[in-house]
Image: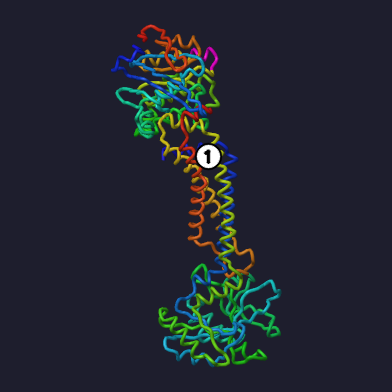
Amino acid sequence: MVRVDGNGNSSLICVRGLDKKYQRGSEEIHVLQGLNLNVEKGEFVAFMGPSGSGKTTLLNLLGGVDVPTRGSITVAGDEITHMSRSKLTEWRARHVGFVFQVFNLIPVLTAYQNVELPLLLTKLNKAERKTHVETALGVVGLTDRMHHYPRQLSGGQEQRVAIARAIVSDPTFLLCDEPTGDLDRKSADEIMNLIERLVAEYGKTVLMVTHDPLVAKRAHTTLHLEKGALVEAAGKEVAAS
Amino acid sequence: MKFLPFIFANLFRKKIRTVLTVGSFAVALFLFGLLFVVRGAFTGGVDIAGADRLVTINRTSIIQPLPLSYRDRLLKIPGVKQVTFANWFGGVYQDERNFFPQFAVDTDTMHQMFPELLISDDQWRAFVADREGAVVGENTAKRFGWKIGDRIPIRGTFIPGIWEFNVRAIYHGTRPADDTTQFWFHWKYFDERKPFGKGFVGWYTIRIDNPDRAVEIIKTIDQEFANSPWETKTDTEKAFAAGWVKQFGNIQFLILTIGGVVFFTLLLVTGNTMAIAVRERIGELAVLKAIGYSDGFVLRLILAESLMVAAVGGVLGMFLAKLFTLAGDPTRGLLPFFYLPAGAIAGGIATALAVGIIAGMLPAVSAMRLRVVDALRRV
């Protein structure tokens, strides 16, 4: 159950008093202010809100690619806010799967090689990597396209490859930043069906930022951010402050 | 090793740019190879000079002679084992452009003094037996297509007249840098025919029993002839060869200057190429970091790409330079030898790799410092 009231310390993701400020010239911008959040394993949470409300910043902080000004983030018992840059990099490799709006595949690598990238950091041998990559591509339904380059794939297929790359190392949770933002409605539906399957069949925990209410409706819970604070929570199992 | 396909894929993302950068390295290294060959042609004699040989010339200048009578006095000096002598001839074969060094040599001692130059005993005996005989280095023989028994007319310059010689022997070097362009003939024949300066030689070459005593023996020799009409100046063969090279100017400085400019330009070209390559891939590098690749990995990735370009270009350039030298001396034998040693090839490739690392360092460090959040915002 997603909680935003500061209780529930045994959750998979536990955020307490999260602040993020940026300095722009002499001006100090508060992007996130005292945010609390608990996400349980296997939950699918959508974040909505106007531009500049702090959605992507929150995702970056949860993914360990940015550091908060104050507050703590604990994931599966690991407090990540005080980790060094190199420790955080190692932690990301083990725990986070990223899905971006613009896919961000490496254009000179095939679908297979793109999906294999996170596994090159592990001690798996070539045969083991092959099994994992084929499995991930099988989950997203692109086994027959594994030797295609990104330019030879449609936008929807590219995003499916990106999802395969995100899940291939079996991370603790997935962070999806506008995963359907660059896709037409049909492709967007396919991607959302896939994400729903990952949650329902494989028990993945997914945190997603979106502007699209139709996409957000597919999540278990939708949280709204405004001016850096969770102002309203909607969904089936939310205990809001 | 598992990242090699990734490095190659990155290099081939802009094929023309990669080919041009590799080409820059290849051209620079080819030029470096040729510069090294030219330097070697001038200074090779210094490198291979015998440690136990001294050269004695007239104190005034090498073009001033020394009396033949000095030979016996030299042999009496403690530490001197062997003495030979020679004269410069400076004749012209057919055309002045067909230059090669000609020396009138002492047939009794020349062969023993330079055992590194190989001549078969039969040929040497034939040379000694023929007053008009000549010994030719294999490079000069090849250059003019001379064979044993050929009669060679040479026009004298400071001693006028046509001098005809019979090729009786061809000598070979034992080391790549041995000078095999020389032409030797009998000093006695030379001394008899010249209308002036009879009984004088151009210089003496002296073998000593212990190279460690060279300084002391040099001093003794020059003191022996001090205050005479023909005072001497003695040096080790190495110092003599180095002094000879200096007459052509500071070859080493020229080579270093040209080479330095070439490599500095290469550094700028490659550095710029790598900087562009990194700038184009900021989003990709950010994604790599986001999915768990460390800053150090990104640094090494960019350096590896830069090194790969340098290695391929460097090896190609040195290979072409070696091929060029194997095809023969384009000056048609003007240079005593035209040879690219293995050490120079290794040095060239090492320099190329160093340029690759330095050129890639700045872009690699900026890629390493890239913050994922900032980079993703730019995508």
Residue beneath the point at 50% across and 60% down: B344
Label 1: which secondary element? helix
- How far across and down, in percent of the image, does residue B149 sit? 61, 79
Location of residue B79 with respect to B5 vertically, above or below: below
- For residue B279, what is the image quadrant? top right
Question: Which residue lies most toward the front here?
Answer: A26
Residue beneath the point at 48% across and 33% down: B285
Location of residue B122 with respect to B318 vertically, above or below: below
Left/right placement of residue A169 relative to residue B74 reads left
- How far across and down, in percent of the image, does residue B112 sit? 48, 82
Left/right placement of residue B313 relative to residue A238 reads right
Examine the rendering and report whether any part of residue B117 can be seen: no
Question: Callout 1: residue from which chain?
Answer: B
Magenta stretch bounds: A183-189
Residue beneath the point at 57% across and 64% down: B253
- The kind of secondary structure the magenta stretch mainly shows is helix
Say which residue label 1 marks: B11
The residue lying toward the viewer, choosing from A94 and B139, is A94
The residue lying toward the viewer, choosing from B108 and B296, is B296
Location of residue A8 with respect to B162 vertically, above or below: above
Amino acid type at image mark 1: Leu
Quadrant occupied by the N terminus of chain B: top left
